[in-house]
Amino acid sequence: MKRTVPLIITFVVGTVLILSVFIPPMENLGENFTLFFDIIAVFAFFLGGGNLVRVHFQKISRKSDDFQFSFVTLIGFFVMLSAGLFKIGNPGDIASSVTADGSLFNTIYQSVFVPLSSTMYALLAFFVASASYRAFRAKNREATWLLIAAFIILLGSTPFGTMLTSWVPESWSIFHIPNLAVWLMSSPNLAGQRAIIIGIGLGVVSISLRLILGLERTYLGDDSA
Amino acid sequence: MKFISILFVFLLSLSVSAQTNDIDSTSIIVDDSLTQKIAPPTSVIVEDFKYDDGDNLNIHWVPSIDDLPQDGKVIRYRIYQSVNNGEEELIDSVNFSVNHKKIEGLDIDSSYAFVVSAVSKNSEAKSNKTISLQPEREWINFNLASLFLIALFITAAVIYFIETARRGKELFVRKIAGLEAVDEAIGRATEMGRPILFIPGIHDMDDVQTLAAITILGKVARQVAEYDTKIRMPVARSLVMTAARETIKTAYQTAGRPDAYNDDMVNYITDEQFGYVAAVDGIMVREKPATIFLLGALFAESLILAETGNSVGAIQIAGTARPAQLPFFIAACDFTLIGEELFAASAYLSGEPKMLGSLKGQDVGKALAMAVIIVGVISITLGEAYDIEFFNNITASLKSFFSVSK
């Protein structure tokens, strides 16, 4: 019963949603199911928040390794929760938006959370450099082609790249580095991407059918196919 | 005397325009002698919007002759609607040079007539009223007939191969390096006595990539339970936490070690993208996992996570259906499941014939795509180069069959 009911729900909802694409009177169903999902997800958020608090309280009480970080997490969690829940420092009354300018919630969000997020995102620049260094090492033939392609695309985006091949006559303009870069992106690169996208589409169809037909049950915690 | 009257009218029009800044929302009384008349739009036609639930109509018109791309007098068109032959009401406006509008949110039981007016800086010219039309409901969207046929063909192929496999026929499925390495990766973590980190992406359970990641988790967790290895799974969504716990718990029960399962194997971090990344990076650096699985919907964080994992010396198996993130994984991870391989993983790892049958059905879809691409490339090349009608017709047929318009 614990497994049968979810399987029936999956089959019915999956089939109805596929049909709704082709039957106009049913086309709003997709949006409605998204709303149902959002409502369920809101309730599940209490589970997540509860789990976060429990895990970090445990860490502190057991004085596990690096338990000091748990203090920071819990303080951050409760300060933001209180600021949002009680609308501390909100201009206007309780009915005003929690993210209104001047509210404590918005101030902390803009002055602490946004800079911290940006800092994490900025790390990407350094990681791109280190990953590129490894990926573009000409250790075999494929990697050498990759290196050449990347070099042309990088050069094609700079004024130096334009200048470098400006002497090439207009009738041979395909060999201008910026044009080569555009060709690499719009022909070989796009063709490869489309091949991957077609594969992904077919993969989604295949896994969706396995889920709808009840062949795939691992997501329900059932390992018997 | 004539001069005085003109001056009076001029001052009057100035005072009227001073009272309002919004020319579009206010009626203006204009003296024809002072304004340039504009021609109204003509041939305004209202039509039923095809293949909808009976809540839309389409109107289109021939633009005013004063609607010119440069130095034209028309600045916009106003659309007036009359419901059940009632009073005309302004419902929308569009910019000049636009000659059609989809009217949405209508009632299937009412009839609608429309008037379109051309609006210049100081005048408005209305078209004749259209006929009154009631929107109609269609039960099947024939615009999507080709999509339906393709979906039917692939679905039939998948079901056929599942049934073929069920009857015991052996099916060949090519080796997927990333999945062949799963055993080795788990074994490595066991030998080193270090944990396995499983990242299921940052999307919720409504994303098929997350579902694919959870199905792989089931297979991984079974082996983890058998080898008595430690698994750590920080998640960004509460529902994923619940589903992952259930999956791991079942895997431990199936492996005969329910006592070894602990809810803390899966813990919720935050829904925020970079907050999650910071926490997971911290876990990687502090706990130094031997094996990291990065599977599911991952975005800008993919390279940050993969590079941090690389820096702690973990063996990494990654997979996503986002083509933009694949190069990052290929650069930073040991094995990458490219697109469809992520969705094939659970079937591949299970080794169940009927699951493998679904992969064969998927291959039929790929064969169809390849055949169509080859025929398309040949026909468009020969058609364009030599202007052969036969090939031009093939190109046109393929284009019309594979162009999906809602």
Image: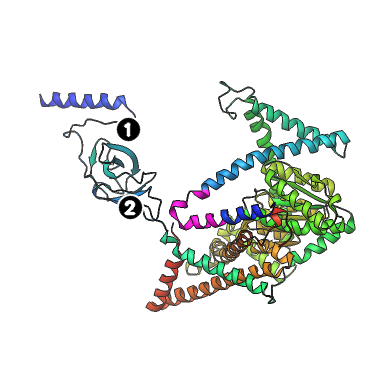
**Quick check: B394 above or below B270?**
below
Residue A29 counted in the magenta span: yes
Q: Position of residue B166 (x, y in %)?
A: 67, 72
Residue B16 locus on image (x, y percent): 26, 26
By secondary structure, the bulk of the magenta-drawn segment is best described as: helix
* Mark 2 residue type: Asp
- Which residue position is annotated with label 1? B25
Q: Give the residue at mark 2.
A: B48
Question: Which one is in front in this view, the residue at disc 2 or the one at disc 1?
Answer: 2
Secondary-structure class at tag 2: strand
Q: Nearer the viewer, residue A66 or A78?
A: A78
Name the secondary structure under disc 1.
helix
In the rendered image, the quadrant that contains the N terminus of chain B is: top left
- Quadrant of residue B350 in the image? bottom right
Question: Does B350 appear above or below B55?
Answer: below
Residue at image position (75%, 48%) is B245
Residue A159 shown left or right of residue B401 in the figure: right
The disc numbered 2 marks a residue on which chain?
B
The three-letter amino acid code for the residue at tag 1 is Ser
State left or right for residue B306 relative to residue B64. Answer: right
